[in-house]
Image (spheres, helix red, strand yellow):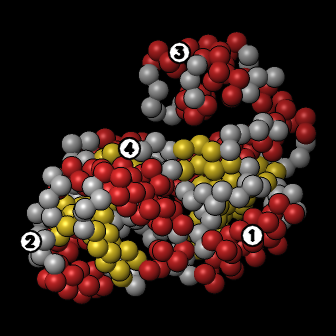
Amino acid sequence: MKTIKDIAEEAQVSTGTVDRVIHNRSGVSAKTKEKIQKLLDKYDFERNLLASALAFKRKYVIATLIPSSKSKNEYWYSPQKGLKSAFKEIQKYGVEAHYFYFNKFDLDSYKKNLDLILKLNPDGVVFAPFFYNTSVAFAKTLAKRNIKFVYININLETANNLSFIGQDSFSSGYLSGKMLNLCTENKGDLAIILSQKNIDSHRAITSRVEGFLNYFSQNHPQKNIEKISFENINPTQVKKVLTKALLKNNTIKGLFVPSSAAYTVAEFLESVQLTNIHVVGFDAHQNNAKYIKKGIIDFVVDQNPFDQGYLGVKILFEYLLLKKQPNETYNSPLVIVTKENVDHFMVTSTVEFST
């Protein structure tokens, strides 16, 4: 029986492309779609997958855990939609979905939901591993119980996860350094905007900062780069701390925000008419897109958050159902989003989120 990987290899495309054709999602050329569809028809792929599920006559319980999102304007709304879209497609195979959400700045909230998942004792888990030490301990418990799990967004590089879907954080930080240097034409000082709560909970943030600094140490070691720290990146904190920092050093020409909160910094710069300071950050969600369109955020590095949630579930499901061994890592592309192409990302989001 052919798997998605087999079809992809024969068509000489990625497994993600085959998956898009199977479920009639956008992003595949007509020529490629036709070639893949012929192979799917040739091997009667959908019927074989369903027959396998019915033959096992068992239900699989899959739990997911990601930060909660208050609105569709925020980053974690996209992975949430990806998770739900994947479950909608596989529910006919007897999959039981359980969604768990936590406050990404609250360790107790995270631990509470981890305990709920362990009480559920699912067959598999897809989760974003915030709070490093707690996540490592949780991963060891899952492995001990033989519960398969997939990391999304943050990679802890433990030996016992089934797979990781997300960006190479170090490389994305390095790319951000290169782009900010181009924006500022190698003039003036730079600053990294850091939230203490993000640093404590989100390992990818630290890795992005390391990549950013590595770019300058390799290419422009003389560059002065400050770190501006906040307890939490919110409008009140940004106004207070950033005003003081910019008054103290008026030679700062570029700001690096290694999280999805660049819009908060952009909002402040617009309010005090300092739009000549360049800003780079992450993720093309709607809050950031507003300021990308205005040119206040020069660019963000997007990481296909919808696909992280979607592929996380599909990879785990195919392993449970077909024992299909996934790759250890599926790196999201480093997509640069600017004023000139941001509308494309908004249109794509609208299409994907209509499911």
Crowdedness of circle 2 by 10 Å Cα count: few (<14), some, many (20+)?
few
- In the rendering, at what x and y percent does residue 85 appear? 58, 47
Q: Which residue is mark 4?
A: 335
| Relative height, residue 280 to residue 131 (above, below) | above
Q: Secondary structure at mark 2?
A: loop
> Is 225 or 42 nearer to us in this picture?
225
**Which secondary structure, mark 4?**
strand
Residue closer to the observer: 342 or 45: 342
Q: Sort mark 3 into few (<14), some (14-19) or many (20+) by Cα contacts within 10 Å.
A: few
| Earlier-in-chain disc, 2 versus 4 | 2
Image height check: is 53 above or below 62? above
In the image, taking residue 136 as reference, residue 25 lies left or right, namely left
Asked if residue 335 lies left or right of residue 32, the reply is left
User: Alpha-carbon distance for marks 2 and 4?
Assistant: 29 Å
How far across and how far down the image is residue 165, in percent? Answer: 59, 48
> Counting residues from the N terminus, which is met first, the one under dot 3 or under dot 2?
3
Q: Nearer the viewer, mark 3 or mark 4?
A: 4
Q: Nearer the viewer, mark 1 or mark 3?
A: 1
| Mark 1 lies on residue | 138
Q: CA distance from mark 1 to mark 3?
A: 44 Å
One can see residue 130 in this view: yes
Residue found 47% across the figure and 55% down from its top:
170
Residue annotated with mark 2: 273
Q: Mark 4: which amino acid?
A: Val
Could you tell me how far apart the alpha carbons at marks 2 and 1 are, in whole angstroms?
Answer: 47 Å
Q: Give the amino acid at mark 3.
A: Glu
Closer to us: 3 or 206? 206
Q: Are marks 3 and 2 in contact (CB under 8 Å)?
A: no
| Residue 296 visible in rendering | no
Tell me the element at label 1: helix
Q: Which mark is residue 34?
A: 3
